[in-house]
Image (cartoon, coloured by chain):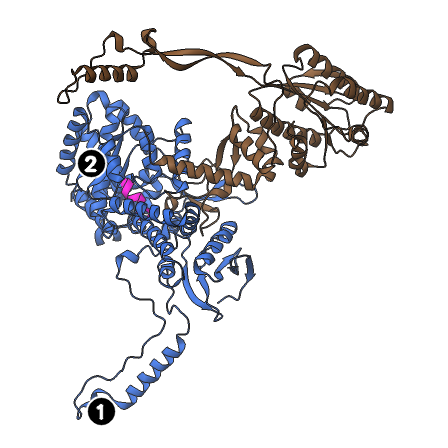
Amino acid sequence: MADSFFFRARRGLSPELEEARVHIQDIAKGHGLDFFETIFEVCDFDEINMLASYGGFPTRYPHWRWGMEYLQMQKGYEYGLHKIYEMVINTDPSYAYLLDNNMMVDQKLVMAHVFGHVDFFKNNLWFAPTNRKMLDQMANHAARVQKHINAQGHDVVEAWIDICLSIDNLIDPHAVHYPKEPVQGQVSPVDPRLPASDYMDPYINPPAVIAAEREKAAQAAQAVQTFPAKPERDVLGFLLQYAQMSAWQRDILEMVRDEALYFVPQGQTKIMNEGWASFWHTTMMTQDILTAAEVIDYADHHSGTVATQPGQLNPYKLGLELFRHIEERWNKGQHGRDWFRTQDPRERAAWDTQAMGGRAKIFEVRKTHNDITFIDEFLDESFVAEHGLFVWERDKKTGKFNVSTREFKAVKQQLLFQLSNRGQPRLSVVNANHANRGELVLSHPYEGLDIQLDWAELTLGNLSRVWGRPVHLETHIEGKPTLLSHDGSAFTKSQREAV
Amino acid sequence: MPLNIDKDLYRFRHIVKGRIRKDLKRFMSSKDMIGKEGDQLVRIPLPQIQIPRLRYGENPSGVGQGEGEGEGEGKPGQGPGEAGDKPGEHSLEVEVSFEELAQIMGEELELPNIQPKGQKEISSEKDKYTGISRVGPESLRHTRRTFRQALKRQISSGTYKGSSPIIVPIKEDKRYRSWKPTTQPMSNAVILYMMDVSGSMGKEQKEIVRSQAFWLDLWLKHQYKNVETRFIIHDAAAKEVDRHTFFHTRESGGTLISSAYTLCLKIMGQDYPAQDWNIYPFHFSDGDNWSGSDTSLCLEMLESKMLPRVNQFSYAQVESQYGSGQFINDLVGKFDADERVVVSQVPDREGIMNSIKELLGKGR
């Protein structure tokens, strides 16, 4: 299927576009960008819309949600609300899409931007474990789902996909970075004795110590009555392993989990990724590519991309400015022990060691950081002041949004909180045999925000359908410890003892 | 060109229809929907269609960038954490065509299709391109048939070569589309809305009438090709008005229902000869008529003049706290056995769906 789409869409670039592509690719390489082979496809409006609703992939499993997104996207175009400038997918080779009736200067901008993204995909460590053959994988998913639809019926399979999607954020975003250890229910006692010859034994294994170790192990084994032994953040993985379901249902749940994990790094590096791509398109366009005739259009469109609505935050803009900030600091040597010891603002402002290490530094940053560490390490007081960042707050009485503070620490803390776990509640399975009745308990460590109740009701209902037994969620609502439960037919909300 | 997305679009539409079906009663009693009617499309808010997830409710705070004017008209910054995947932030509106909505309503309320009268008499002529002829203007040349003819000729005369499959049509090969005038049965219908706008009909009652009129229009437009609507308001006197005025007028006078029926008959006589038109008078009132003698006049007019000419006369009584609600009893008393008269009582918004079912349930 994927092949057939590309076969159809691959019209090849026009000589003019191909010339631009080669030119820009050479320039990008010259700047040290290191990307996968990048294939540009020229698409018309409808195709671009379709690809965008499929998340950039030409073949996805059949589902109504793509149709809905497609319709909304069309509406957005009709009303001129948004315009997709660039779309590129993280695969090797990478595919990027150009809208056929864009102006030449736009196509150049998109190409330059895309090379920035692909360099980021290839080199950023958070992307390292992603499946670079995801295009094929997605097509395989489509075929698998189609097979299940043929066997089970469309409505049944679609309803199951809805259920799986409803819990697809209950994954461990870091699961791909470490080897999976089996979920432990029992700690098997390890013999504390070390091998030793007879005459040494009392010294190497003193009887008193051995007895104490054994006692500890026995206690530990006693203590582990909950299953899983440790809270398990990979709820979907846990369900796959332990929930009762039929083979086709398991297959679909597994597929949904794979796709969710694949998209995790994009959520973790939104600011950096867009910032990096924007950094390179501005750098390359202004230094190397633009002809005099194109400058005005370029400036117009670029400013549209990085425009900040008053009071809003644009990840393109924030990332771009932060990369520039880092480059400038390292060019002037504004880092290290001496820099941090200097308190005098005038001295700091005039600080310039001519170190010119900025370029190397930003390449290093794009390799090792994600949004959280990026903000944590480089968002400093002068940046916040210079770019006018603030914390807003919704006034409960008037419903208006007010600037609550411009204080550096508060801004940074708020931003970091928003970025934690991609802005979603952090849930884990803490008990799969609640009250010895096989009921599932999830726990949500309270961070000051309430879980939305109406959706929680629906989602817990879905979760109980997957688990096959009642499920509970330990959380806080309006500051009070609360237990949300769903037994498959009814939703209840009750007080619980604070732990 | 066929895109994969078509199937997904179809599934989405399928789900939307299922959802509307399920919530039809709510939609039928909702005010919002009527206000959003476009030309041929209805916009229906469907918040529940999105996939629910465990997530935070609306953030009470966030980070923004910019001037942030003084007391703060700042709008919430787009939390970068949720960028790319923000379910449910915007309420979803889906568009449904009148045709689809009418179909759903018909199926859900089990409305019978109307057998229009006068099908035979009423017809229109239309040219239909049905045949092929050997002569005709070049603009109507049927290229595929022409080439097929040429291919046939070349094969039969042995001039066609598989190695160089060149087909050259000559004059005799040419084929043209040809047309035939056909008569098509046309079905015309006119809906005559009459409403009591006397003091006892309050704002809520009018809103109910408005909702009802929307659904009645929808169904009759689904059933007939050509539907006209006329509007009559009355208190002690009747006048014809446009749609907007119909729904927004408030008079304070008393009520003489016969005035409306008289005007209705006049309009029917002038513009809608019974042999050409399917006529549907709908009368909405709170059932308060001024005098018993006027009521008997109304019944008399209905029986002798109105009923012989219309498909169905419908009376819907919208309950108000002021009206006596007597008129419906008088109607039922007189026309209980008559198929051509349909009455319905609408106690409140919730009653709209039932009322529509009663009014349209006979398939006349």
* Residue A375 showing in the rendered view: no
Tell me, yes or no, whether the two marked residues, 2 and 1, touch with CB atoms within 8 Å. Answer: no
Q: Nearer the viewer, residue A445 or B271?
A: B271
Taking the image as shown, residue A114 lies to the left or right of residue B232, namely left
Q: Nearer the viewer, residue A318 or A272?
A: A272
Q: Could you tell me the amino acid type at mark 1?
A: Pro
Classify B152 as above or below B68.
above
Disc 2/disc 1 C-alpha distance (Å): 70 Å
Q: Quadrant of residue B346?
A: top right
Quadrant where the image shows the N terminus of chain B: top left
Q: Nearer the viewer, mark 2 or mark 1?
A: 2
Q: Does dot 2 land on a helix, a strand or a loop?
A: strand
Q: Residue drawn 29% across and 18% down? A: B144
The picture's colour for chain B is: brown
Residue A270 drawn in magenta: yes
Percent position (x, y) of residue B229?
Answer: 63, 19
Mark nearer the N terminus (2 vs 1): 2
Q: Is residue B22 left or right of residue B88?
A: right
Q: Residue at image x 28%, y 14%?
A: B146
Q: What stretch of residues is rendered in magenta?
A: A267-275
Q: Tell me the chief SS of the magenta region.
A: helix
According to the image, label 2 marks what residue? Answer: A39
Q: Quadrant of residue B238?
A: top right
* Image chain in blue: A
Residue type at mark 2: give it. Answer: Ile
- Residue in front for this viewpoint, A244 or A93: A244
Subunit of label 2: A
Q: Chain of mark 1?
A: A
Q: Which residue is mark 1?
A: A202
